[in-house]
Image: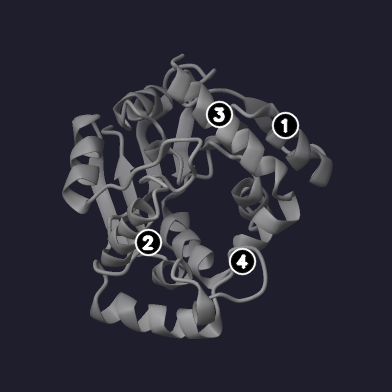
Amino acid sequence: MNDLYDSTRKGWSDMWEDATVADELATMYYPRSQAIMQAFLPWLPRDAPVLEAGSGLGGPVIALRRAGNSNVIGMDYVESALHAARRHTPGLPLFTGDIHAIPCADSTIGAYLSFGVLEHFEQGMGPALAEARRVLRAGGILVLTIPYPSLVQRLVAGRRRLLGKGPLVHDDFYERTYGRRELVANVVDAGFELCALRPTSHDYTLWSLGGPFRAPGYYRSSRLAETLGAALARLLPWAFNYTTLIIARKPA
């Protein structure tokens, strides 16, 4: 692997050291996360494994299994995060693996989930999507959330450049945003059929501005941010979303 790829892994390892499983799990019950979950849950199969690729501290895996999706499993390349998740929830089905070389046989996974992961690699999302397609069975479902270059995102990035901090959200690892056309093109070029595309997390866009838009807690938006975010989701959905949810299918 190259130096930037290794620094990405190190960046995630450092970040997970500064977080807790309880904190990450709590975010799964924030309104923005619940809205995303309710949007993709109907697409998940009940008769095959559902893989969260890049599961980190395991928040989504725990939350989904608590919600009755007992076939959800997690994978991450930061082993310390997996150990922390298992200390919190013994027996949680997790394994070590890289999204570019998943240790699963061809056509064995019913759905592939990736929440804010594929944007972190210099080579783009193509190689990871190809590997996702390999392990998914025919008709299998792909669910991604990816940062979107909204107006606020561009303003925040511009402010960082003016302050001399560079364009990255975290100075030790790579991250980028994807517009709608580019995101759809990547997914379709990888051999998937588009099922749904949805702007999400408008309140978190406001959270990134700080001040009255933040509430006490781990990345928690204030009631003001949630209220304004809900209005923006209706009025200007693609101007103020923080992420895009995309759902696609591997052709049968």
Tell me the residue that label 4 is attached to.
Answer: 29
Q: Marks 2 and 4, Cα distance to the nearest angstrom?
A: 17 Å
Which image quadrant is residue 81 in?
A: top right
Of mark 2 and mark 4, the one earlier in the sequence is 4
Tell me if mark 4 has few (under 14), some (14-19) or many (20+) residues whose alpha carbon lies within 10 angstroms of its own. Answer: some
Q: Marks 4 and 1, Cα distance to the nearest angstrom?
A: 24 Å
Q: In the rendered structure, which amino acid carries the disc numbered 4?
A: Tyr
Tell me the residue that label 2 is attached to.
Answer: 242
Which image quadrant is residue 135 in?
A: top left
Helix, strand or loop at mark 3: helix
Tell me the residue that label 1 is attached to.
Answer: 80
Helix, strand or loop at mark 1: helix
Of mark 4 and mark 3, the one earlier in the sequence is 3
The residue that appears at 34% across and 30% down in the rendered structure is 129
Visible residue check, residue 138: yes
The residue that appears at 42% across and 48% down in the rendered structure is 165
Of mark 2 and mark 1, the one earlier in the sequence is 1
Helix, strand or loop at mark 2: loop
244 left or right, relative to 41: left
The residue that appears at 29% across and 28% down in the rendered structure is 126
